[in-house]
Amino acid sequence: QSVLTQPPSVSGAPGQRVTISCTGTTSNIGATYDVHWYQHLPGTAPKLLIYSNTKRPSGVPDRFSASKSGTSASLAITGLQAGDEADYYCQSYDNRISGWVFGGGTKLTVL
Amino acid sequence: QVQLQGSGPGLVKPSETLSLTCAVSGASISSSNWWNWVRQTPGKGLEWLGEIYHGGSTNYNPSLNGRVSLSMDRSKNQFSLRLTSVTAADTAVYFCARRPVAHGFDVWGRGTKVTVSS
């Protein structure tokens, strides 16, 4: 059971918008630690999608955005494309373990 | 372009020690970054194992109960993971990754699959 809670799956049609939630506690997201998001295609290296809650690394399209509030964070993907099908993970620091924790991952299916 | 390449045995026997190395190219491991290991067990999500800084400071996931240790070899520009007393539960794909200070894990290796079996 992951420290950060994500829905196991989300889906949407091409062109639509989907959101993926990430719920933590007062020892991680709620303690004002940054949230980072990753995209992971099986068999490949995870890719940093969003860092420090809302920032996109260069090369990541602005179709990807994120927000954070209280003990939760959210990733939004607009203009869904077939190539967006992947697993998405949130990550934050947790002061109970003095280390990094991940969400359980959300599988995005583009219908 | 920074690249990380993990390597090590793909098969380890139960109770033995798993040792993996991550070779870094395009950047110095003596730069201001934390160097991490993360694993993904079959059918499950990502689990952070530990990280090491160029000065030698380390942080480990306490869930591993002291079985994990990280080290770095500056002469070879690589860092390593050592996981002792492995069981089948340690079967996973192991990733190495770079984390700049106050940042997410921005560069990842492709992953090394390790199976624990006799």
Image (spheres, helix red, strand yellow):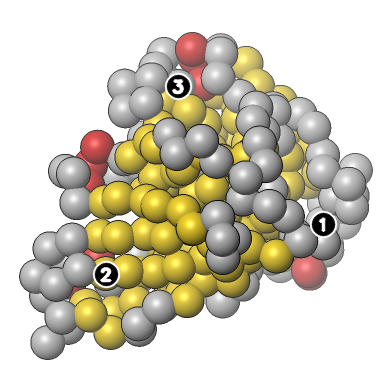
- Viewer-nearest of labels 3 and 1? 3
Q: Is residue A82 left or right of residue B18?
A: right
Q: Is residue B104 left or right of residue B116?
A: right
| Label 3 sits on residue | A28
| Label 1 sits on residue | A80
Image mark for residue B5: none
Q: Amino acid at mark 2?
A: Leu
Count residues near mark 1 (Cα–Cα under 10 Å), then give few for <14, some for 14-19, many for 20+. Answer: many
Q: Amino acid at mark 1?
A: Leu
Among the 4 quarters of the image, the one containing residue B27: bottom right
Please report contact status of discs 1 and 2: CB closer than 8 Å, yes or no: no
Please report contact status of discs 3 and 2: CB closer than 8 Å, yes or no: no
Residue B25 position (above or below residue B53):
below
Residue B19 position (above or below residue B77):
below
Q: Secondary structure at mark 3?
A: loop
- Viewer-nearest of labels 1 and 2? 2
User: Does residue B46 appear in the picture of this structure?
Assistant: no
